Image (cartoon, rainbow, N blue to C red):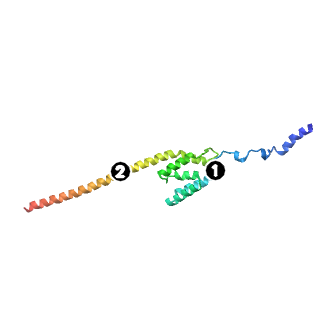
Amino acid sequence: MPRNLLAAPLLLSLLGCQIPETLQPAASNLGPACYVSNDALADLLQHQQRYLSQSDRARKQQLAQAIRSNDKALEALLLTSPMASAEQFGKGRRLLTSLPLYPSADCTADRYLDIQKSQLEPRQQLHSLIQQQSAKIQQQSAKIQQQNAQITELTRKIEALTDLEQEITRQRKDL
């Protein structure tokens, strides 16, 4: 019996203290459950870059494809792009905030989406400010056009009065 006890440590050292696979935790339990895999980040960024550099028609097609493929992360990114309308931006914002992201160091794609989400409020404020300034510029442009029309009308009236004055002066000389 004592020999068996001495053989056990020797046997374990020869095996290299390997744990049988059945006792090892499953690989899926090792890391966090990222919403978007890190491998998919490059593809996601390519789609976003392509979307930003395409024509309106191609952007609509790419967005429709993202919706059909049920890729919520890509759809949210495209809908919150600078090219998006106010309606699209709102829809994308709601979609992006509803995604169950895990923004840790292990989930790079989720961190990227989380950063995009954190940028939504400042971008919305900037977009609103740009729209307000655009409306002001349009109002100023309308005022300038109205004033130019008044200037043209006043110039025409001054020229008519000048012609009338010259005509009266000629008539006086003739008398």
Amino acid type at circle 1 is Asn
Give x and y (percent) for residue 24. 76, 45
Q: SS of the residue at dot 1? A: helix
Q: State the residue in front, 23 or 53.
A: 23
Amino acid type at circle 2 is Gln
Local crowd size for mark 1, using a 10 Å CA cut-off: few (<14), some (14–19), many (≥20) = some
Give x and y (percent) for residue 147. 29, 53
State the quadrant of the C terminus. bottom left
Q: State the residue in front, 7 or 90.
A: 90
Q: For the image shown, how many numbered marks are present on the structure?
A: 2
Residue 82 falls left or right of residue 24: left
Q: Residue at x 46, y 47 (%)?
A: 126
Q: Which mark is residue 139?
A: 2
Q: State the residue in front, 120 or 71.
A: 71
Q: Residue 150 carries which label?
A: none
Q: Earlier in the sequence, mark 2 or mark 1?
A: 1
Residue identified by numbered label 1: 38
- State the residue lying farthest toward the left: 175
Give x and y (percent) for residue 46. 58, 56
- CA separation in Å, label 2 and label 1: 49 Å
Q: Which residue is drawn at 52% across and 52% down?
A: 79
